[in-house]
Image (spheres, rainbow, N blue to C red):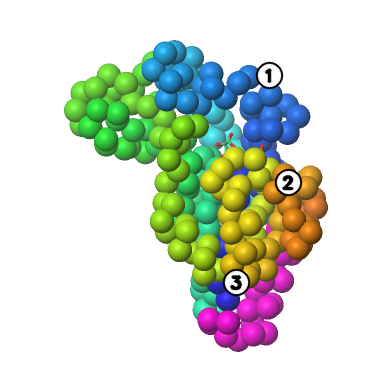
Amino acid sequence: MRVFLLTGAGISADSGLDTYRDAGGLWEGRSFEEVATPEAWREAPESVWRFYQARRAQLAEVEPNAAHAALARLEREGAALGVEVTLVTQNVDSLHQRAGSAPLAMHGELELLRCERCGVAVRDRESLEPARFVACAACGHGRLRPGVVWFGEVPLHLPVIERALARCTHFLCIGTSGAVHPAAGFLAYARAAGAHTWVQALAPPDNLHPADRFVQGRAVEAVPGLVDELLSEARASGSVSS
Ligand code: APR
């Protein structure tokens, strides 16, 4: 069994972080072009920095929840059963990492800051002042940028992701609206490749298809049960590569 997991903001909603497109979400009343593009960073770095510093500061106040923990359990217990698990997240909150997973964070991480001049990236949880930029310790450049992937930039890890997608037998996406490409296309890709496709979210996402199994509800309530099902199936099949 080869399981591909794709997570979005919905899995972290139960930890207290806003999603992007639900009512009251991060983009509501604000255009993402104002804060989440390279152009915005060039033209108004102070306001972009303030936005990301607020989100970076919020990370100290939240914890991974039962859904993050369940996926980490799937990786751990699945490994003992020969299940291959690929966890890809669009989230930049590092909550999977704190729950014990090592996801492919395709949109980067808020904890990372990166130098546009020399390319060095640093993990920084301390510099949280809204109005003070962080200089690059490696080359002296005065302003590190947030280590996230903005609109108009290429997501990370795409070659590895594509290989795992083409091979997966089970595809489960959790808490993502299916509105942002390329991640929004992964569900159709896995379906076409013959995988069982399961979709978990509060509301049916834009890219849901009748062939997908839709599990509606909060991730903290639904995901532990889905993980149990996958592990039972793996135990019953007893096969590594079926
Ligand atoms: N449990 C499960 N699903 C939930 C919950 C919850 N408690 N709360 C909300 N959801 C679902 C919603 O039904 C919706 O499908 O999570 C999804 C959130 O969608 P978005 O806000 O669009 O978040 P996401 O899909 O992760 O956004 C993708 O867009 O702006 C960019 O880069 C940003 O990575 C982000 C990308």
Residue in view at x 54 percent, y 35 percent? 59
Q: Is 61 drawn above or below residue 233 in the view shown?
A: above
Most common secondary structure along the magenta stretch: helix
Per the image, the residue denoted by label 1 is: 29
Q: Are marks 1 and 3 in contact (CB under 8 Å)?
A: no
State which tag comes first along the sequence, 1 or 3. Answer: 1
Which residue range is magenta in the image? 222-242
Helix, strand or loop at label 3? It is: loop
Place of residue 148 in the rendered image (x, y in percent of width and height, measured from the top left): 45, 35
Per the image, the residue denoted by label 3 is: 169
Q: Is residue 229 magenta?
A: yes
Residue 70 visible in the snapshot: no
Q: Is mark 2 within 8 Å of ligand 1?
A: yes
Name of the residue lying farthest toward the front: 192
- Local crowd at mark 3 within 10 Å, few (<14), some, or many (≥20)? many
- Local crowd at mark 2 within 10 Å, few (<14), some, or many (≥20)? some
Tell me how far mark 2 sits from mark 1, CA to CA.
Answer: 21 Å
Amino acid at the residue labelled 2: Pro
Residue in view at x 57 percent, y 63 percent? 4
Q: Is 224 drawn above or below residue 242 in the view shown?
A: above
State which tag comes first along the sequence, 2 or 1. Answer: 1
Per the image, the residue denoted by label 2 is: 205
Q: Are marks 2 and 3 in contact (CB under 8 Å)?
A: no
Helix, strand or loop at label 2? It is: loop
Amino acid at the residue labelled 3: Thr
Residue 91 visible in the snapshot: yes
Q: Position of 218 compared to 94: left or right?
A: right
Place of residue 98 in the rendered image (x, y in percent of width and height, measured from the top left): 51, 49
Tell me how far mark 1 sits from mark 3, CA to CA.
Answer: 40 Å
- The quadrant in which residue 225 appears is bottom right
Helix, strand or loop at label 1? It is: loop
